[in-house]
Amino acid sequence: VDEKDEGFIKETLEGVNPADISALLHEFDTEDSKYVIDLLPSETRAEIINDLDEDIRERFLKVFQPNEITEIVNHLDSDDAVDILNELPIKEREEVIASLDNEEKEANILDLLRYEEDVAGGLMAKELIKANVNWSVVQCIEEIRRQAENVQKLYSVYVVDDNDRLLGRVSLKRIILAGDKTQIADIYEPELISVETYMSEEEVAQVMRKYDLEAVPVVNMQGKLLGRITIDDVVDVITEQAEEERQIMSGISGDVEEDDSVWMLTKARLPWLVIGVVGGFISAMLIGVFEDELLRITAIAFFIPLIQATGGNVGIQSSSIVVQSLANPSAFSDSLAKRLVKVFMVAALNGAVLAVLVYGGNVISGGSQNLAVVVSIALFGVVLIASFMGTITPLILNKFGFNPALASGPFITTTNDLLGLAIYFYTVHLML
Amino acid sequence: VDEKDEGFIKETLEGVNPADISALLHEFDTEDSKYVIDLLPSETRAEIINDLDEDIRERFLKVFQPNEITEIVNHLDSDDAVDILNELPIKEREEVIASLDNEEKEANILDLLRYEEDVAGGLMAKELIKANVNWSVVQCIEEIRRQAENVQKLYSVYVVDDNDRLLGRVSLKRIILAGDKTQIADIYEPELISVETYMSEEEVAQVMRKYDLEAVPVVNMQGKLLGRITIDDVVDVITEQAEEERQIMSGISGDVEEDDSVWMLTKARLPWLVIGVVGGFISAMLIGVFEDELLRITAIAFFIPLIQATGGNVGIQSSSIVVQSLANPSAFSDSLAKRLVKVFMVAALNGAVLAVLVYGGNVISGGSQNLAVVVSIALFGVVLIASFMGTITPLILNKFGFNPALASGPFITTTNDLLGLAIYFYTVHLML
């Protein structure tokens, strides 16, 4: 690239899949990348831009002229085009839209810009092939021919009535196998799963996973066919969801990656750390209350980490299991009471094993007998309470509309640390 | 169901999507479910069985006769059939295979049984439509007609040479648009992404996501076309992967769900809890070493939870960011040295903010000035070390072929707890 060897670059990249080129471009700075991209055919260029990570793309698009962006947008499906337009400054966006020469595309894009990015309306593409129920197969093939350039991935043709209301679908396989004179009305499948524009992307993903769909039509509240969502967009949704949940679990707020700036990374991490520190302060005050006990028997302090670590681990395990069954409602058969009984039994079993273990360890290491008993009893109590808290917190969060995965992170650790400590010192206070 | 009102059940379930029926059956015990299932058409029955959770299905299949299972298997794609056969006792499995009357299906199933479940060979279905490159479009449509019953989801036709080696594909759209006399050789796309039988399911998922594929052909090492993997199976792989990672992160081993038995749940949770307890014991011994300091200044004990919580939180955050960029290699541009410098800067910034906060808190609450200084310095050190450990651990695990997500769980918490404590007490020892 440094030597600007045009011929060589062109030759090398010819026939290479756009997804591979864009993986390569991640390592370039924007100016070199722009140079390479400009050498490529415009269709490949559009695909590469479409493939980039959102934040990289936003930076990258700054070096493009509006007319260059128009060219890119012309090559993309309406849903991807809208994603890119949403990243542009408003003035540039208007410029690009105004300069689109394909009127249908312009109308589609204006229509999609209305929807939030995270609902079905924002995920859908307007490009699809629909056939009137009164058509014949020949008319339908005519329509496929007319639309073929616009629609990249074609799974099936949607069948609508005169008012554009969705009636069903007919697969390409059936169209191929049918005779030319067959009526669409005779071969379409009326049973069809669709989603409405306002459904959240998570719900759309759930529907498509449940019914193993490769594409799902989007309708408005009157049942009118507006667009379709393809499985590749939903795979992205599922992956992002998993990533987001992992971040929440590890106490990172906001969508950061290792290559973000130091400042962004710090900002994403500080909030939960501060909460942890505040929890630590409250712990300090709590221990302060029992200073007399500490002065009397210093060895009490030895077991603070043991109690806290167990409380935190048990809490996270419990909440994680509940979060999982909330995400996968089919496992939802038992009543709350039954579930709590089960949680209690598991906790009692775990707690008993750990308590015996710790007691044994204390006896072997030759510490005070009395303290050993107290630590084991407290530990048992901590396991019970932490299990209960870990189970109930995500259920409550879910009830009030928060993401239950919040309960798997530092939040549950901090509260359980505190609770565990309180139980421990109170037991000490009572028994020693 | 209790009233055995056959007519009513049949009528109600007619036209209901199989996925909905199976969601319903989760709440039945196996005998009632069997009764309902027997009333359904055999194709629906096969789909429902196919949809069930693995562990539920294994239990459920016990009440079926081998000839009933044969009937189910006859209705399924070869990959799903093999999944079910793998759940049967070996004797019953042989019985079912022997009683299959479709020879092609039998050969397909026997072929697939060879592969592990978690490689491309185990995910693929043998059902696909292939066309010889020398055929015309008419011959190809003939073949589609012949195979149409076997292949449920048809995205494109794979093109092979005389030795069955994969050459490319031709989409149904193109077949529809081409004239009858067109040769396949003229319209197929030679550029094609395929996977080999031995590739892991994670790699397959990555390929399909990267190139936005709805189906990918599977070839052997000679390039011979053996089967294809469809996106719906890969969506399941991605979802399972995310679930597994979440379990590892929350310190649960093995694939358990809330509706598993008390014993299973306990077994999955105990190992990490024991590790936590062992860590707690080592902490106790460590604190014991500094008993003299504790006797001199009891207030040292107050800040044990603060130090530990911060160490644990910082460690998990750091490792989680690294695990994420390991899973998504495109973000991998910087060298190790550069990454560590960045980690150090983020840690220094976070650590400084927290140290100031804690110092301020200590001054306001009127504790000892000297201790406040020591706690803040120790906290700063803990943030630095925990960041470093959190970053380096998943990298090392990854290097030696372990799942780096292991580093986001109780493992990193336990080690950081210990390290933090050591740093704290050593600082106290030096400065007070």
Image (cartoon, coloured by chain):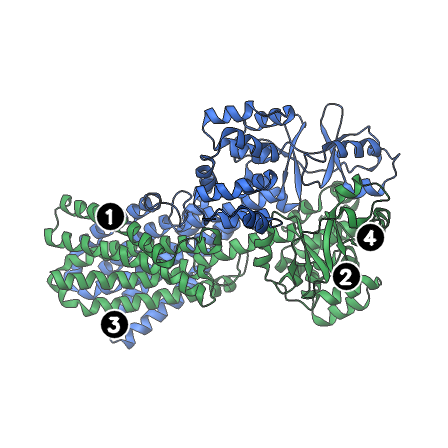
Chain colours: A blue, B green
Instruction: Give the SS element for disc 4.
Output: helix
Q: Secondary structure at mark 3?
A: helix
**Is B225 located above or below residue A152 in the figure?**
below
Question: Label 2: which residue?
Answer: B164
Residues indicated by labels 3 and 4 sit on the same polypeptide chain: no
Q: CA distance from mark 2 to mark 4?
A: 17 Å
Image spot of residue B353 (x, y percent): 24, 46
Query: Looking at the image, do the residues carrying marks 2 and 4 touch, with CB atoms under 8 Å apart?
Result: no
- Please tell me the numbered disc located at residue B414: none
Q: Is residue B313 left or right of residue A330?
A: left
Residue identified by numbered label 3? A369
Say whether mark 1 and mark 2 are on the same chain.
Answer: yes
Residue B185 rendering spot, x and y as whole percentages? 78, 50
Q: Amino acid at mark 2?
A: Asp
Kindly report which numbered mark, 2 or 4, lies closer to the viewer in this rendering: 2
Which label sits in the foreground, 1 or 4?
Answer: 4
Q: For this view, does A52 lie left or right of residue B381?
A: right
Q: Secondary structure at mark 2?
A: loop
Q: Pointer 4: what residue? A: B147
Q: Is residue A82 above or below residue A30?
A: above
Mark-to-mark CA distance, 2 and 3: 76 Å
Q: Is residue B130 above or below residue A145?
A: below
- Give the labeled residue for mark 1: B354
Q: Earlier in the sequence, mark 2 or mark 4?
A: 4
Are labels 1 and 4 assigned to the same chain? yes
The CA distance from mark 2 to mark 1 is: 65 Å
Question: Could you tell me which quadrant the C terminus of chain B lies in?
Answer: bottom left
> Relative to residue A102, is residue A368 drawn left or right?
left
